[in-house]
Amino acid sequence: MVLDMDEGYVRGLLKSSTSIVSVCKDYFLLFGFAAFLSSFMVLDNWKSVNNVFYGLVLLPLVFCCSRKQLIRMHRSWLVNLFFLFILYLVASSFWSSSFSMDVFFRYMKRAFYIYGFFVAVFVLVDDFTRFSQSVINYFAPVLLCFSVICLVVFYQEHDFPRARLLGQGVLTHPTFLSVVLLAYLGAFLWGFFDHFRAHGWIAAFSFIIGITVLILSQSRSSFVALIAMVVVALLIDKKSSRFYFLSICLIVLAGAVSYYMGLLTNRGMSWRPEIWSSVLERVGGCGMWFGCGYGGWESETVVVADMKFDHAHSMYLGQFFYGGVVALVSYICLLVGFLFHGLRVRSAIPWVLVLTAGVFVTLTEGNKLLITPSPIWLVLFLPMAMILAISLIGTGQDSET
């Protein structure tokens, strides 16, 4: 009897120890993911951000992810089509003029990183029921404080307001600084008004800071993204029409002020027509259906006024250049699919707004999808992964997606 009790005690102890270890692993992944998001604002080079992703997200993911979770994730036809599309982009390196096995394995490795990122988000949403909203509740206020710091630091040494605002860390690009802030601020305010309508002054103050950053960043792409977010939010929830009407008024006012100050017009078209003409010309030489393939973009693609441009300045034209009509149409259909899935579940609506910002800002920004961690991940891959996970786990009806 004593032996039986000892065996039962040992089994219980082992079970408890296993449970504790499992919880610790999940929290390690959770804090690693938070550190990864923070690294965009803290670290000043992309290699360091990549190392944070590899060491604090991918490594613990190996121990946290279960076979059952992978099976559940792949019940979604959307995720399967998305990664089939990613594999097509990798395979396009075979018909690139600069093909080599090194190039192929480089893009295969990047595809693996993107896959790992989606799996990590799925595991965290599955293990922590409030994870998706907590990311917004954490990231938006941090981005707001970060933007205020950027304003103070930058304009201590530059002409206010003529100088174009640059960020800190790796979020230095004015367009991505403003659009990442506005995307997550918009998602945060969506949930904020559901629970804290009495504290509208906080939302108004936050929105004013966002508009200030938008004006000083002198980014037309971010203006378009913000307008698209407000329109989508207005179409989704007409009950908050007063708030969104105020938002539209503020956007129009900000646009008028920016135009008056010449902040949005002093850079002309930023050579976009010349860059896009070059893309179309080169695709015509490669073949419109399958494009030129992933193999690297020659730095002398466009040379205007002694300036070299080494990417398409449009995610959509980038897909057309590298993967042809097949890639472009597939990419657009996948974006529509993710947005549709997000609209089915109310808890995913904030991420629909973030993805909307990403969809519109990349009309004139971006190039390749197969990239290591960058701001593109924050406005495209993260909302995609969240929408996927919420639509599968949040509804409890995996098979429907």
Image: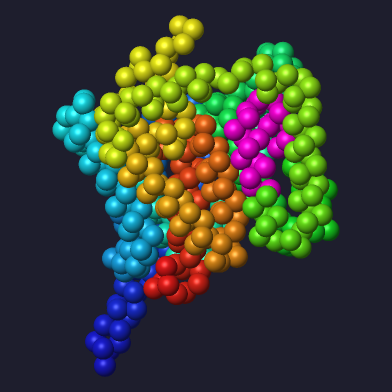
Tell me if I can see residue 374 in this picture.
no
User: Is residue 67 depicted above or below 206 in this figure?
Assistant: below
Left or right of 58? Residue 125 is right
Between 146 and 401, the one lying in front of the other is 401
Task: Give the magenta range.
Answer: 210-230
The residue located at (32%, 29%) in the rendering is 283
Among the 4 quarters of the image, the one containing residue 161: top right
Among the 4 quarters of the image, the one containing residue 286: top left
Identify the coloring.
rainbow
Percent x, y for residue 396?
A: 47, 74
Percent x, y for residue 246?
A: 81, 47
The residue located at (16%, 33%) in the rendering is 101
Left or right of 131? Residue 323 is left
How many numbered marks does the figure carry?
Answer: 0
Percent x, y for residue 397?
A: 45, 75
Tell me if I can see residue 390 in this picture.
yes
